[in-house]
Structure formats: C-alpha cells, structure tokens
Image (cartoon, grey):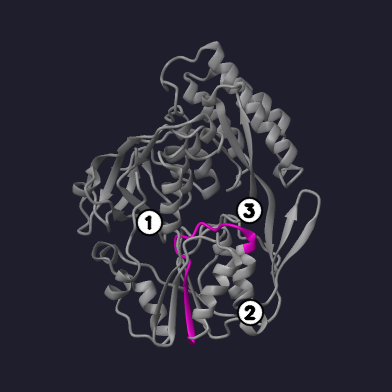
Amino acid sequence: MLARRVTGGSGVRGALIFVCLLLTITAGAGFTAQQKPTKTDRDDAHQILHDAYDAVKKNYYDPKYHGLDLDARLREYDGRIEKAASFGDALSVVAAFLEGLNDSHTHYNPLPSSARVDSGFRMQMIGDACFVTRVRPDTDAESKVHPGDQVVGYDGYEVSRADFDRIRYYFGVLAEQTNSKLSLRDLAGTEREVVVNADVQEVKQSAVDLSEFGSAAPDDPVREGEYQDHIIRRRLVEDGDVAIWKMPEFRMKDGEIDGSFQTIRKHKSLILDLRGNPGGTLPSLERLVGNVFDRGVKIADRVGRKESKPVVAKTRGGDAFTGTLIVLVDSDSTSSAELFARVIQIEHRGTVIGDRTAGSVMEAKHYPYSRGLDTNGFYDFSVTDADMVMSDGKSLETTGVVPDETILPTAQDLATGRDPVLAAAAERAGLKLSPGDAGKLFPMEWTRL
C-alpha cells in the first residue's frame, strides 16, 4: 500500500514530501504536540526561527544564500508560525525555513529527547530501493520485520532515494517515533503492513550534560564513552597478502592511522571498507590520504564565505602504502568517506566498489542557542560554512560518488547475511572469500539503549 503518492522530479518531489511531512510532524521533547500552542509557545517558536535566521545570516558559506531572499523568507515563516496548530507544527516551520537552502549540513537540532529510542531495526537505501538490513534481537521488531524486506512505505510515505534522508530527519530527529508504521515487501513479493514498537529507555539528565548539544546525558558518562570508543574502534583483518580495514568513522588521531598502516604495509593489497562511514574530521581525512600516496595530493578546495583554500594532504613518504587499494562505499558513506573515495578515483590510485554515496559533503559548524535559563531550552543549528570542491571542479553535494564498479547486495543476500561486495573486492585482491564468509567478518554490534 503506497499512501500519499508523490510524483515529479527529485527537486519537486522533495519539496512536496516536505510539505506533507510538515502536516504530520509532532513536537520535540517536553511538549505535547497536538495541544493548541499558547502565546508563550508561539513566542518561543518565533525566537527559535529568528535564531535560525541569525545563524544562517552570519555564518552560511554562500552570502547570496543560493538566491533565497532570507529576509522575505523570515517574514513568511513568521506568519506560518502564527497559523501553526501546535507547538510541534511551529517547530517544523523552523525546519522548513532552513530546508529552502537544500543543504545537507544546514538544519535545526532540537533538544534531544530525555529517552533513548531504538526502533529495533535498521533500513538503508540500496540502489533505488530501501531495505531492512538488520534486526535487533529481543525486540518487537524481531518477529515483525526481517533483513531483506523491502520498505516501500514509512508512516504512509513512499520511500525513495530522493526522500530517504528527509524521512530519517523528520521522523528520527524532529519527531522521534516510539513506533514505526511500515509497508513491506518480502522476498516472495508479498506485501504487508506492520507497526513496530520501539524500545524506549529513560535517561537521567543534568543541566551540565544538556548543554552538550546533540546528545542526552548518559547515566554513566565514563562507561558510555568507553562503549562508544569500542563501537567505532578500528577493525582490521589480515589474510595472506590482503588487509581488510573496516573504518567506521574519520575520527582518529594521526598515530592511530599511522599505526594501522604499519600493519597494512606488510600486505600487497588493502580493502578499505567505508560503507556506513559518516565521515568525521578533516585532519583524519588528510592523514588517511597521506598514507596511501607517495606524493602530496590536493583533496579539494574549501570554498568558504570569504575565501577559497586548497586542502592538501602531505604524503607519509616512504611510510605510505603503495600496494593495491580497493575502497568500498554505499549510500550511507558520507562526508570525508565520499571525499576520500573521489580522490582515489580522480588520482587513479585505486578502485571504488559498491553503491553510489550519499552526496552529503559540506563542512558545517554547530551554533548553540537557548530560550532562556531553563535547561529544557537548549537547541542548536548546524550551518554549512564551506563547500568542498574537488580538483575536477565539481562538488559531490547531492550527487555523491558513483563507484567504478557498482555491486549491490540483493534482498536474498541481506536475508542470509551474505556480503557480495566485500567478496568481489577480495577476488580483485587475489583472495578467495565467499559472500557468506565475507558477511561474517564484521558482525553487527548494536549500540546500547
């Protein structure tokens, strides 16, 4: 069943689905979404909107704002707040105000929920279709959804590549869902509808922790930090002449990256798995590039509001890895992961295999604001302060990296835990690795609730 069907080009489709989402989004933590907003609620929403305007006006990398009349837009959206039926609707107006920039890294981040919410499953775009990729044991999802199920509808909306990130943002950030209404198609082609209840765990918070924008306070900050370090740790497998490095984020110290390459240099081939990698810091990207080139390499031009500066990676010289390089990417490879993959292509240093990447490569900073002294009033805005233009003169924003060889797992692969992408890369590197064995190399590790 495909409710609220939207047609047209990707830009038109994105705008239309956004309008539809505005009609259904609920409020953030601390407010009752469907209650009629009080005067204080509306005043708060106006302030948040004006803060969004202020953050963009002062900091956005393009002083022309892609042709938007920011002042006229502010007046228009102030008027929309006056017509909002709930505080949640008013907050969605703030998100819509920023959406006009069509920028992957510019958005509103409301105060996070006082609870950890886990849907119990993960879904991802594979090619032009969305699939359930993982299901968490001992959850409501376990008996209702299965890896390999195609997600054709989420809460009544068609799921497409053009709209996927919007759906994730609105239902995962602005209006975090305690249940997910899914229209699914199984391996046999049979469609069904399910409602999956999320696992919800209240989190003890403090005023100090709430000032750390974008994350609720953990019950035990030290233990939580140790656990997150474990989740994003380096995972390196050595097999004969081949090293396979699962790199979850570009957030590593120079010594950690160099230490990895001490091991990698013992091998003739490196398979660098950047699937699901959300990017990270520019220094980590530069260090990684410097470890796979025997010369300095220009990564991109950082085009900011006032100047454009080249981003150049210094080679590690004799310590650089010079063997065969194969890079794996998918639709959840973003930011630095995309930049790295494209540099490898432009410089003909290796081969990129997998799915087209996210096309989310802008550089942004977070700007915190609050409605007052109340700890429930903290929020921030992510605002792009630079675009990264590659040495071929093109930006990857919205387009992503098209692999040299597109290989996509099938629904059956997902259902059985096979990894044909890694298996194909291994074959290129001269290593015999079946899709089934490849799927067991880096098992899913669920974050704690």
Q: Which residue is mark 2?
A: 293
Q: Is residue 98 visible?
A: yes
Q: Which residue is mark 3?
A: 362
- Residue 431's quadrant in the figure? bottom left
Q: Which mark is residue 420?
A: none
Q: Which residues are magenta?
A: 267-283
Residue 416 spot, x, y in % from top left: 24, 65
Q: Earlier in the sequence, mark 1 or mark 3?
A: 1
Mark 2 and mark 3: Cα distance apart in space: 24 Å
SS at badge 1: strand
Characterize the local packing of mark 2: few (<14), some (14-19) or many (20 or more) Cα atoms within 10 angstroms.
many
Q: Is residue 104 left or right of residue 196?
A: right
Q: Which residue is nearer to you in this view: 27 or 182?
A: 27
Residue visible at 31% across and 70% down? 439
* On-image quarter of the N terminus: top left
| Residue furthest to the top | 39
Mark 1 and mark 3: Cα distance apart in space: 25 Å
Residue 41 spot, x, y in % from top left: 53, 17
* Above-or-below relation of 393 to 434: above
Q: Nearer the viewer, mark 1 or mark 3?
A: 3
- Residue 259's quadrant in the figure? bottom right
Q: Are marks 1 and 3 in contact (CB under 8 Å)?
A: no
Q: Earlier in the sequence, mark 2 or mark 3?
A: 2
Characterize the local packing of mark 3: few (<14), some (14-19) or many (20 or more) Cα atoms within 10 angstroms.
many
Q: Amino acid at mark 1?
A: Ala
* Above-or-below relation of 27 to 153: above
Q: Which residue is mark 1?
A: 129
Q: Amino acid at mark 3?
A: Met
Residue 115 spot, x, y in % from top left: 38, 34
- Based on the picture, tell me whether residue 290 belongs to the magenta stretch: no
Mark 1 and mark 2: Cα distance apart in space: 36 Å
Residue visible at 43% across and 40% down? 218
